[in-house]
Image: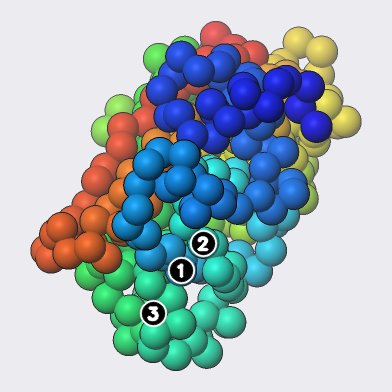
Amino acid sequence: MVGVSPSTVSRVLNDRSSSCASEAVKQKIWEAAHEINYIPNSAARRLKLGETEETPTLRLAIVLARTDHLQQDPFFRELYRELEIEILKEGYSLTGTLTAAEAEQLTPGQFDGILILGRCFGSLLQTLSECTRHLVGIWRNPINYEIDEVVCDGREAARLAVSYLIEKGHRKIGYIGDCSNESRYVGYTETMILHQLPLDYDCIVSTDHTEQSGYEAMLQIRQVSGMTAVFCANDISAVGALRALREHRVSDRRKISVISIDNIEEAQSTRPMLTTVHIPRKDMAHVALQILTDRIRRGHTEKMRVEFPCQVVERESVFDN
């Protein structure tokens, strides 16, 4: 399937060192393994390694707390894929992938551990806690140490994005994204106020985080006088905003800069290529699984939080003003 030798495939699937193959080859092999639902033969692996004691396979589940379909949110789709790869590498079993509604029907003992994609509150978190004590959340904004969590702070990511626009000379900066109980909106407003820049509500649009919403929001605000840049709360909204700018040019002389958060794969294929704040999905997935298995094996008992830094990835969609 991949066009490499069986020995190369074996080394990649069994050797986690960086020297066994190039990153491109390793990625192709793991994608092929995912495509055919490859599960490592633990008995054969133990025989080859000379091991006799069998380690029980963990039954793990992933709960999609913020979306019903992975296709709706490329960030969580790519994070989900990284988790699948990590689970496969460790030889565990991904027994279930559940939406929030499906997870509400869980009963205790169905899974050894659960990974939650997207922040959840209230009844869902209570239900999951009753099913198992082995929970890890992966999301952009921390909660109050209710469960183990791996985060990359959306508020800080927004501050980085808006500060970058200000460094580029922009002073009237719009916002596209959720404005209710959303830390990225808080980060946007705080940064504007910190730099003594006025908030113009004519160029602030509260939307859900979809490509079509980003497209429609940009059509709404692109003509606002003096606005030279827009911060979108996530990449897929920014992809829609850039499409609106391509299809409905304000003028040949006026350019509107666009920046966002996530650094999804599509950020490099849109035109212009999207300047964005990188969220380290691969590392977050790796650490989340390590924390989950450590808790299952009683390596730690206190609730813990691991927070990853974020950084601006400069591309083509931000211009000097």
Q: Is residue 276 above or below residue 51?
A: above
Cα distance, mark 1 to mark 2?
A: 5 Å
Reading the chain from its start, which is encountered first: label 2 or label 3?
2
Residue 293 appears in the figure: yes
| Number of residue marks | 3
Q: Secondary structure at mark 1?
A: strand
Cα distance, mark 3 to mark 1?
A: 15 Å
Residue under label 2, please give it.
93
Count neighbours of disc 2 (C-alpha within 10 A) and say few if under 14, some if 14 to 19, many if 20 or more: some
Residue under label 3, please give it.
128
Count neighbours of disc 3 (C-alpha within 10 A) and say few if under 14, some if 14 to 19, many if 20 or more: many
Residue 78 placement (x, y as % from top left): 60, 44
Residue at 63% across, 28% down: 9
Work out which quarter of the rendered image holds the C terminus and state it: top right
Residue 176 appears in the figure: no
Q: Amino acid at mark 1?
A: Arg
Q: Is residue 147 above or below residue 188?
A: below
Callout 1 touching callout 2 (CB < 8 Å): yes
Q: Quadrant of residue 27?
A: top right
Cα distance, mark 2 to mark 3?
A: 19 Å
Residue under label 1, please give it.
59
Q: Is residue 269 above or below residue 76?
A: above
257 or 106, which is in the foreground? 106
Residue at 83% across, 26% down: 246
Task: Decide if residue 164 is on the left or right side of residue 253.
Answer: left
9 or 258, which is in the foreground? 9
Residue at 24% across, 56% down: 294
Mark toward the viewer: 3 or 1: 1
Task: Decide if residue 236 is on the left or right side of residue 139.
Answer: right
Work out which quarter of the rendered image holds the N terminus and state it: top right
Residue 257 placement (x, y as % from top left): 61, 22
Which colouring convention does the figure follow? rainbow
